Image: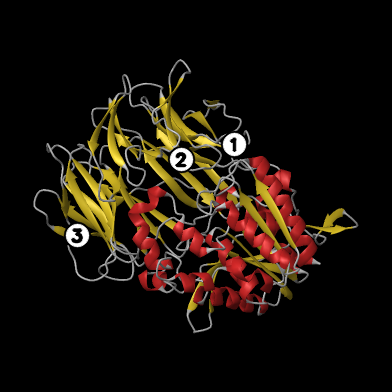
Amino acid sequence: MKRKNKFFLVILSLILVQSCMQQTNNKRVPLMQTGGFKTYSADEFYKTTTVFGSSLNHDASAVLVSNDSTGVFNVYRIPVDGSEPTQLTDSRIESTYAVSWFPKDERFIYQADTGGNENTHLYVKEQDGTVVDLTPGDKNKASFIGWHHDDRHFFIASNKRNPKYFDLYLYDSRDYSRKLVYENNKGYSLLRLSENDKWLALGKSNSNADSDIYLVNLLQEKPTEHLITAHKGDVSYSVYTFTRDSNKLIYATNEFGEFNQAWSYDLNNGTKQLFFKDDWDVSFVYFSKDGQYQVTGVNADAQTKIKIRDTKTNKLIQLPKMPEGNLQGVNFSKDSKLLLFYVNSDTSPSNLYVHRIGSNKIKRLTNSGNPEIDENNLVASEVVRFKSFDGLEIPCLLYKPKQAATKKVPAVVFIHGGPGGQSRKGYSAMIQHLVNNGYGICRINNRGSSGYGKTFNHLDDKRHGEDDLQDVVYNKKYLQSLDWVEKDKIGVMGGSYGGYLTMAAMAFTDEFKVGINIFGVTNWVRTLKSIPAYWESFRKSLYDELGDPATDEERLHRISPVFFGHQVKSPVLVVQGVNDPRVLKIESDEMVDAIRKGGTHVEYLLFDDEGHGFTKKKNRIEASNKYLAFLDKYLAN
């Protein structure tokens, strides 16, 4: 499977949706009377907390996490003994995200941008409470790469020298001085460092279907790149990890079939051999700090299946009775005695657990869900497939609301971001809120989605707004075939690339009663000419998939809804962040104007302090109220 860029991925887990209520004489009444279950308000759903992160501190007594219980994300210290957490950052405006504890003390690194502009800086919170910006500069973007094996130094990637490319810097944790250790002048992606800090693995995108891995020996006086994936034809390569003894690189390749397999490259003699494969994409492989345990994840039909293997016995470890759901975010203490993990399901948000290996108990460290919401009132999705216009089977996640047991309900086709994203099983307050209040939801994985093999992943190349749009239309036809769906009350919505396909559906077809476009691309010519400088390393890959505006402008114009706003005949809601660097505000401005000039009803909601995704709860709540008021008025009625 090709490594599609993250160009238009929407932060769907952060967009939570207000409960569905009809409007009658400006008063809200339940969409339909419930029987035997309860519906919940937006405020109740927004009491759910999003939590992530699993860095253990130097003595394995506490976990560093981020959560949004204050309304924006802040950093917290969660003791592994189950005692009360401590809030470590107190941001009221910008979200701050946990990165890592320092290896020998209680300092920690976190990251933040400004207003969603994606110019991420890295900060240190000192033990006395002072904060140090490690990567100052208005236009700089930085990311944490990892700790040096001496536990005193750490690595950061930054585009300070050249906005197009990321260089590798080594920082000293005593005074935060830094030195350049790898200057990137050829557009490589910095992927992984070996445990002994000798080897740096680089990625190089040749096209949207072809890539390579290079290795750099950082101990050389003048580090040079060495290609290790010479091949013929289109083959995609990416990096999982290095073995803990720094003798092998574990990498991904789709050279031998439809799906990514894990292969090993011996750093001493250059030999390669199969390491792990499955009937689906191998999503990740990594090891505990001491190498005793190997963690593998497989993307099995829109959900991740994790296995933890003891490398000494080659046996899977047996965990105690677990809560319902899937494991995520598995991490170990340095001595591999403590195992941290999250459990997430369609009906329950992620919660953090700790397990002492060898014991028969697990301890829950967070309570992310709202205790007032009974999970029995929520709905788990079902993986279903339907045939599109050409007979191709299209997978999707179908949510049947409890109201449908007694009455037909309106439904919405929900389109993920990407274009190479994937709708996956797992908790989404946005989806659950819609379903809980009576809307059927079908989260489509149209052609071009990842997770279903490289052939499926490439079927939309330079066919965007054409074949993938027909998948969306045939998803509607599938919903109309269900006996619990109101056939004339089907809408479409999505974010980012899903927002684009939403607008394409509204402008180029008359199939849907309403559309909700959440920061979707509407002018491909402008978008592809205005990509951020730091996407230079995969510009060609982007053009291979979508089209080069220098040579494909006619086609890009033809599939851009903004030029065909007069063709939109049904109501539309557009939602946009002012600071979005991916989908510029002007695109949504012009789309709204074009629809209005055509005489069709359109509503527009702007957030001055957001970018490509809404991180602040107050904004998510406001957006949710708008989504639901719009759907209630124009779809449910």
Mark 2 Cα-neighbour bin, 10 Å: few <14, some 14–19, many ≥20? some
Mark 1 Cα-neighbour bin, 10 Å: few <14, some 14–19, many ≥20? many
* Residue toward you, 39 or 634: 634
Q: Which element carries disc 2, helix, strand or loop?
A: loop
According to the picture, the residue beneath numbered tag 3 turns out to be 229
Q: Which element carries disc 1, helix, strand or loop?
A: loop
Q: Which element carries disc 3, helix, strand or loop?
A: loop
Q: Amino acid at mark 3?
A: Thr
Q: Is residue 210 above or below residue 605?
A: below
Give the CA separation, mark 2 to mark 3: 32 Å
Instruction: Give the residue at x 12% y 36%.
Output: 221
According to the picture, the residue beneath numbered tag 2 turns out to be 119
Task: Please provide percent x and percent y for residue 168.
Answer: 28, 38
Position of residue 423 in the picture relative to residue 155 (left or right): right
**Tag 2 near tag 1, CB within 8 Å:** no
Position of residue 200 in the picture relative to residue 367 (left or right): left
* Residue toward you, 390 or 504: 504
Residue furthest top in the image = 128
Q: Can the viewer see residue 311?
A: no
Query: Which of pointers 1 and 3 lies earlier in the amino acid sequence?
Result: 1
Q: Amino acid at mark 2?
A: Asn
